[in-house]
DNA sequence: ATAATAGTGTCTCTTAGACAATATTTC
DNA sequence: GAAATATTGTCTAAGAGACACTATTAT
């Protein structure tokens, strides 16, 4: 009963919203295999590092974002024997949601980084099995908007109801009634915490600003249907 | 940029229902570390084996169940640096749900195997970080009963509405109104497919028998509240 | 004033949950 | 018939979705 050696990596599905689209962070590979192709950011787990720590470290290296401001959660493990032609590599993917859109930083083994619209990445092919990992990450985000306060992770620390609604509309690629949405999210226990101030950055009547509340689940859930 | 060697294992949270309780499959460790302690079944991933294949192989080795009859899905990856004192081991845990209760088979590195009530395992401590993995698996199963047809995975190929209800009651440790439950599940699109026959194995008026339907989601969801 | 967005109220329809009533078996 | 379970029906309250209406800003 042996224990054959594997390499273990973490890969990141980092999602954000530009003005108009759901985007994922991709880096151009600077070394073989798949030299010059786009891939998800990621890297090898260090000998004494927990998986979650490795994911947070890679996220900081690739984006320069302060760890506290970004939601991150484990997505899944991927370990097909031929997923990396060099050797046997098992990767544990993490899903991160970033509120704004900072200029990506090129990492050590990445020549270039950019935010790519998820829609356009369905045509373009990513390196390794990263197409699948990205698809799984996007689907996880879509599903969790239904029954968790995850949508607030796409928002700045203070946000309006309209900004939160735009998150749902862009991630789900749908339109939601502003009035019913407003009634629903302001009524959901622990989802929103009023700051007391308002903003006119969206035009029209000033909108109240909110912070994330303490709720870990969204009840009643938001329905896609 | 190196790639330090890791061992990779799969561990299994196998759940079933006895007459009265939700039970998990545990094996007594026949080798150090944690010699003599109870642990989740699992083992090393082979050099040319996919993670899911390794999980199905281990499941067959430990339970003797035909692979087609058991629901299995990936749970999560666990990779704390000190989770195995021998070496750096990353494990990918899988969740399996079995319909009936076959006599467990002792595996190669397990001296003994048994179905242990999940309730009692909260006191008893499992080897490695298996307490955490088990808790995550049980919570996943509980959560998925709400919005997926997963409960049918605990049932035999043909089952009654009362048997399905008992799944919910045992996994959630709650009581559900038989009449409302019946109306709900028979009305859920694609959940149940009538076989045309009936059974009196539960006593009283004969109950219609059903097979799993094709639905992948349960809509409207079953609520715990 | 007009346009734009924020927020509230109202109506209808569906569903959850409580529970009465009926149906079909075994003993 | 009595006991047990299956299945259907009825009522009430809560929430979803459609949409009229009012509120508050900029131009």
Image (tube, coloured by chain):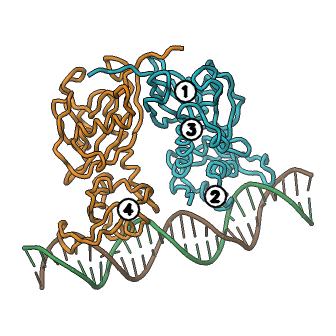
Chain colours: A cyan, B orange, C green, D brown
Q: Is residue B163 left or right of residue A182?
A: left
Label 4 chain ID = B
In the rendered view, would you say B151 is above or below A67? below
In this rendered view, identify the residue nearer to me: A118 or B175. A118
Image coords of residue B27 (percent x, y): 21, 34
Labels 4, 3: one chain? no
Q: Is label 2 on the same chain as label 4?
A: no
Q: Residue at x 17, y 34 (%)?
A: B106
The chain holding disc 1 is: A
Label 3 and label 1: CA atoms lie apart by 21 Å
Pointers 3 and 1 in contact (C-beta within 8 Å): no
Residue that badge 3 annotates: A131
Q: Quadrant of residue B157?
A: bottom left
Residue position for label 2: A181
Residue under the point 52% across and 46% down:
A215
Badge 2 and badge 3 in a common chain: yes
Spot occupied by residue D8 in the image (x, y as percentages of width and height):
35, 79
Residue shown at the point (61%, 44%) measured from the top left: A152
Decide which of tag 1 and tag 2 comes sooner along the chain: 1
Q: Give the left or right position of residue B127, taking residue C17 as reference.
A: left
Q: Nearer the viewer, residue B207 or A135?
A: A135
- Tell which circle, 3 or 1, labels the residue nearer the N-terminal end: 1
Say whether mark 4 and mark 1 are on the same chain.
Answer: no
Q: Quadrant of the N terminus of chain B?
A: top right
């Amino acid at each position: 009963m042996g224990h054959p050696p594997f390499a273990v990596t973490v890969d990141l599905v980092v999602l954000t919203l530009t003005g108009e689209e759901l985007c994922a962070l991709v880096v151009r590979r600077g070394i073989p295999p798949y030299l010059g192709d786009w891939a998800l950011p990621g890297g090898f787990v260090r000998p004494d590092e927990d998986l979650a720590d490795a994911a947070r470290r890679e996220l900081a290296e690739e984006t320069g974002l302060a760890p506290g401001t970004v939601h991150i959660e484990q997505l899944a493990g991927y370990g097909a024997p031929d997923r990396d032609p060099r050797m046997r590599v098992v990767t544990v993917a993490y899903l991160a949601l970033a509120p704004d859109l900072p200029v990506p930083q090129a990492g050590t083994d990445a020549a270039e980084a950019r935010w790519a619209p998820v829609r356009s990445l369905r045509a373009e092919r990513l390196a390794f099995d990263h197409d699948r990992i990205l698809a799984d990450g996007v689907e996880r985000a879509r599903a969790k908007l239904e029954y968790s306060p995850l949508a607030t992770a796409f928002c700045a620390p203070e946000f309006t109801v309209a900004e939160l609604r735009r998150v749902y509309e862009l991630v789900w690629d749908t339109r939601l009634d502003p009035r019913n949405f407003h009634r629903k999210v302001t009524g959901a226990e622990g989802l929103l915490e009023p700051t007391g101030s308002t903003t006119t950055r969206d035009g029209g009547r000033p909108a109240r600003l909110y912070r994330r509340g303490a709720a870990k689940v969204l009840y009643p859930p938001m329905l896609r249907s």
